[in-house]
Image (cartoon, rainbow, N blue to C red):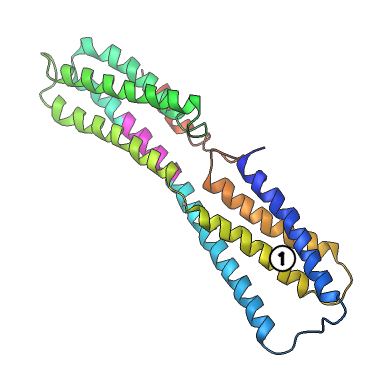
């Protein structure tokens, strides 16, 4: 089971239980309809706080998702630019560097396919850093070798630097998430809203459509938020966007 369903499914059933618990509590003898502004004010405050927190969390997740996709395109552009500037190097040094670029681009395309701290991720990170160092050192030597374009150092090295720097930006973007307390509050407020919604149901007749519909909509929205926030843990992935990097690799002759 993936990360998001493992949290959303228990939330769905917890909300069903609390909706029914609130309905039964309201139906108990001696629980008359609440008068005055007290209960509606509390109910409105809790629902309002939950809606605000969910809206900001979902909006932030979508923004970070877009940032991930933009960084992939930016990295593809940086790699493509650096690759084209290999033409400034001596012809004898180019074939080996071009092969290193193809290997590096393949590694970068699949760098974030797996969860953090897994053997595949650790191995991909180590190989990526090794190739970065080798490309940099070989390019530095070639740029200062006889036969290199006079502007090779000025044009190629900044392009390589940008290609390497973008890797840190992508890594930091994947590690940037709201504090865990935010999701804890979402779950607590979801349960509180379910209890209050059940308590506020008119009449004592159970409405399965209302109970299941309310629990499903809330839990599915939180599920979607988690899927977007953690694209390596659930069903939503960035693999289609990574095709941009693979296209750059395929264009390398």
Q: Position of residue 206 (x, y in %)?
A: 87, 67
Q: Is residue 76 left or right of residue 209?
A: left
Quarter location, residue 170: top left
Q: Position of residue 162 (x, y in %)?
A: 27, 35
Q: Nearer the viewer, residue 252 or 18?
A: 18
Q: Is residue 80 left or right of residue 175?
A: left
Question: Does 134 appear in magenta?
Answer: no
Task: Tell me, yes or no, if residue 252 can be seen here.
Answer: no
Q: Magenta part of the protein: which range?
A: 68-80
The majority secondary structure of the magenta stretch comes to helix
Q: Is residue 96 left or right of residue 231?
A: left
- Tell me which residue sits at (37%, 33%) in the image: 76
For residue 91, above or below residue 104: above
Question: Does 73 appear in magenta?
Answer: yes
* Quadrant assignment for the N terminus: top right
Q: Position of residue 177 (x, y in %)?
A: 46, 49
Q: Is residue 182 left or right of residue 23?
A: left
**Residue annotated with mark 1:** 194
- Please, what secondary structure does the residue beneath circle 1 have? helix
* Quadrant assignment for the C terminus: top left
For the residue carrying disc 1, how many other residues have a C-alpha within 10 Å: few (<14), some (14-19), or many (20+)? many
Q: Residue furthest top?
A: 92
Q: Nearer the viewer, residue 231 or 197?
A: 197
Q: Nearer the viewer, residue 69 or 44?
A: 44
For residue 89, above or below residue 56: above
């Amino acid at each position: 089971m993936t990360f998001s369903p493992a949290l959303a499914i228990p939330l769905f059933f917890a909300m069903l239980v609390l909706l029914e618990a609130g309905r039964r509590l309201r139906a108990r003898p001696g629980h008359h309809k609440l008068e005055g502004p007290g209960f509606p004010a509390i109910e409105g405050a809790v629902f309002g706080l939950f809606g605000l927190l969910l809206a900001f969390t979902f909006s932030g997740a979508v923004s970070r998702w877009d940032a991930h996709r933009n960084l992939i395109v930016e990295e593809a552009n940086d790699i493509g630019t650096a690759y084209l500037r290999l033409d400034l190097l001596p012809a004898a040094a180019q074939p080996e560097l071009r092969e290193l670029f193809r290997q590096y681009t393949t590694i970068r395309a699949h760098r974030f396919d797996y969860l953090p701290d897994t053997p595949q991720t650790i191995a991909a990170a180590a190989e990526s850093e090794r190739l970065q160092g080798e490309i940099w050192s070989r390019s530095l030597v070639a740029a200062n070798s006889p036969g290199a374009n006079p502007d090779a150092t000025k044009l190629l090295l900044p392009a390589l630097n940008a290609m390497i720097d973008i890797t840190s930006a992508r890594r930091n973007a994947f590690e940037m998430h709201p504090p865990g307390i935010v999701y804890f509050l979402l779950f607590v407020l979801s349960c509180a809203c379910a209890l209050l919604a059940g308590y506020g149901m008119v009449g004592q007749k159970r409405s399965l459509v209302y109970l299941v519909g309310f629990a499903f909509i809330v839990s599915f929205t939180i599920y979607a938020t988690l899927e977007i926030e953690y694209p390596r843990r659930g069903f939503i992935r960035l693999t289609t966007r990574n095709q941009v990097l693979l296209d750059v690799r395929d264009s390398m002759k």
